[in-house]
Structures are given as structure tokens and as C-alpha cells.
Amino acid sequence: MVQHQPSPLDGTFAALADATRRGVLEQLGRGDASISVLAERFQMTLTGMKKHVGVLEQAGLVRTEKVGRVRTCRLGPRRLAEEASWIERYRQTWDVRFDALDQVLAQLQSPES
């Protein structure tokens, strides 16, 4: 059995895999918001939104601060540089492979001399 060591990428990609959490990040990119405002915006319960925010917070994408009864959310310290670098490596690999495929297809489509 292969042992997998969790990395920060795992938490980030798991957090970003959900459309609601991506929407929360977009909303927080426009400005801080309370959990109740986010829950209303995404038409869900406070408990549901707290769970989404918790996943984002655990991944370092969101920070929360409680003042009185209001928990305010803001974008967290993670800048996604490691994730962007990982994606870029694979993008470059696929670009090379697709370029090679284009060349093969061009050769197959050219009339034989």
C-alpha cells in the first residue's frame, strides 16, 4: 500500500473543489463579511456556512475574528504561490505533449510526396 504524506496542497485543493467555497473567496476578495452575511448571500444556514468557512480557514485561505457575537471573515495569508507553481508545471508538460501531437497530426494530414 502506498503511503501518502498530506501536504498544504491537499487542503487547498480540497477547499477549492467546492463551488460555494470558491464563491466565498470571490466575495471576500471584494471585502470582509460576517458569516451571517455570507450565509444569506449563498442562501444557506449559518451552520453550513460555518463549516465552509472552517475548511477555508484550515487551508489558510480565510481568517476569522470574533467580536462580540459577530464572526467576521477576511482573506487569509495564503497567496496560492505553491499551488500556482504546481499547476504551471503540469500546464507546461501538457503544452509540450499537445505540441508534439499537433506535429504528428500535421504529418498525417499532409499529402504524401
Image: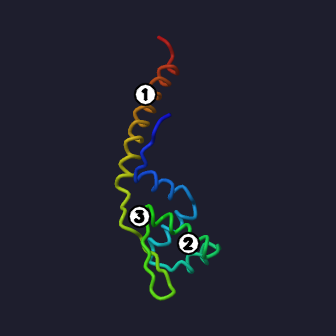
In the image, residue 15 sits, relative to residue 94, either above or below, namely: below
Q: Residue at x 48, y 67 (%)?
A: 25
Coloring basis for residues:
rainbow
Quadrant for residue 78, please give it.
bottom left
Residue 60 tag number: 3
User: Of callouts 2 and 1, which one flags the residue occurring earlier in the amino acid sequence?
Assistant: 2
In front: mark 1 or mark 3?
Answer: 3
Assign a secondary structure to mark 3: loop
Name the amino acid, label 3.
Gly
User: Of callouts 1 and 3, which one flags the residue occurring earlier in the amino acid sequence?
Assistant: 3
Name the amino acid, label 1.
Ala
Name the amino acid, label 2.
Lys
In the image, residue 29 sits, relative to residue 110, either above or below, namely: below
In the image, residue 92 sits, relative to residue 76, either above or below, namely: above
x then y, percent, for residue 27 = 50, 72
Crowding near the residue tagged with mark 2, few <14, some 14–19, many ≥20 C-alpha atoms within 10 Å: some
Report the front residue among 99 and 7: 7
Q: Residue at x 59, y 75 (%)?
A: 39
x then y, percent, for residue 70 = 50, 85
Residue 100 tag number: 1
Between the C-alphas of marks 3 and 2, the distance is 15 Å
x then y, percent, for residue 28 = 46, 72
Crowding near the residue tagged with mark 3, few <14, some 14–19, many ≥20 C-alpha atoms within 10 Å: some
Assign a secondary structure to mark 2: helix
